[in-house]
Amino acid sequence: MNGFVFDTAHLLAGSLVLVSFMMLYQDRLYALLNVFALHALVLALSVAWQAYVQDAPHLYVTAAIALVFKAIVIPVALHRIIRRLGIHREIETAVGVGLTMLAGIGLVALSMAVMLQVTPEADPLAREDLAFALSVLLLGLLMMVSRRNAVSQVVGFMSLENGLVLAATGARGMPLVVEISVTFSILIAFIVIGIFLFRIRERFDTVDVGALDDFRGDQR
C-alpha cells in the first residue's frame, strides 16, 4: 500500500510538471487556457490524493477550490475576456519555443538536484512533491518572462501559484484559513488584472507588453 501511495502521488505531481511543459509549448491563447484548466484539474487530483494520504479533510476543500475556480471559473472568464477584447489568438514569444523548452528542462533538473540535496532527512513523499512543486513554480516564472502577451503572463502567474499550493500540501499541508485567504487573494488579483487588460486594450489597442515598452520609450 505504501508503494502504491508513493507511486500515485509521484504520478500526479509529475503530471503537473508535464502539463506545465504543455503550456510552454502552446502558441495559441485558447489552447493555452484549455491546458491551464487541465493543469488545475491535475492539481485538484493531487491535493485530493494528499488529503487521503495524510488523513487531512481540510485539503479536500483546497482540492474543491482548485477544481471549481482554477479549472472552471478562471479559464471560462479568460475565454470571455479574449473574445471581448478581440485579442489575436497567436501568442507572441520573447524566446523561441525550442529554447524555452530546453530552459524548462534545465530548470526541472535544477529543482530536482537542489530539493533532493537540501531535504535528505525529509519524508520521501514530501521530498518528491516539493521537488516537483519547485519545478512547476520555476516553469511558471519561465512562462511569464518568455511570453509577451499579457494574458499568457497571467496564466503563467496562475500556474506558479499552483506550484505553491502543491508545495504546501506536500509539506503536510497548511491551515485551511490560509489556503482560503490565498485563494481569494488570487481571485482579487485576477479581477484587477482583468480590469487592467481592458484598460490597456482600450488605450493602446494591444496587450503585447513589448509594444507597451516601445510606447513608454517613445514617451521618454
Image (cartoon, helix red, strand yellow):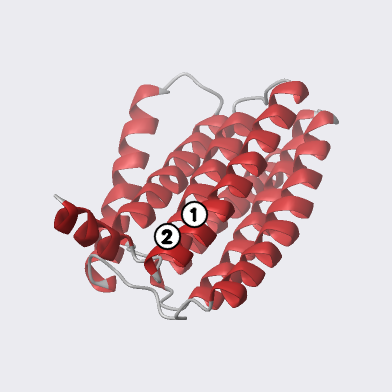
Residue 28 against residue 112 in the figure, above or below: below
Mark 1, secondary structure of its residue = helix
Q: Position of residue 170 (x, y in %)?
A: 61, 33
Residue 65 against residue 67 in the figure, above or below: above
Asked if disc 2 and disc 1 are in contact, CB closer than 8 Å, the reply is yes
- Look at mark 1 in the image and give the residue it sits on: 154
Crowd rating for badge 2 (residues with CA inside 10 Å; few <14, some 14–19, many 20+): many
Q: Position of residue 70 (x, y in %)?
A: 68, 53
Residue 204 against residue 48 in the figure, above or below: below
- Residue type at mark 1? Val
Front-most of 214 and 164? 214
Kindly indicate the quadrant of the structure image that contains residue 131.
Answer: top left
Residue appearing at x 43%, y 39% in the figure? 134
Left or right of 130: which side holds 67?
Answer: right
**Residue 83, label in figure:** none
Front-most of 201 and 11? 201
Q: Quadrant of the N terminus?
A: top right
Disc 2 to disc 1, how far (Cα)? 6 Å
- Residue type at mark 2? Ala
- Look at mark 2 in the image and give the residue it sits on: 150
Residue appearing at x 70%, y 66% in the figure? 76
Left or right of 215: which side holds 203?
Answer: right
Left or right of 140: which side holds 52?
Answer: right
Mark 2, secondary structure of its residue = helix
Crowd rating for badge 1 (residues with CA inside 10 Å; few <14, some 14–19, many 20+): some
Residue 148 against residue 40 in the figure, above or below: below
Kindly indicate the quadrant of the structure image that contains residue 26.
Answer: bottom left
Kindly indicate the quadrant of the structure image that contains residue 172.
Answer: top right
Q: Position of residue 153 (x, y in %)?
A: 43, 56
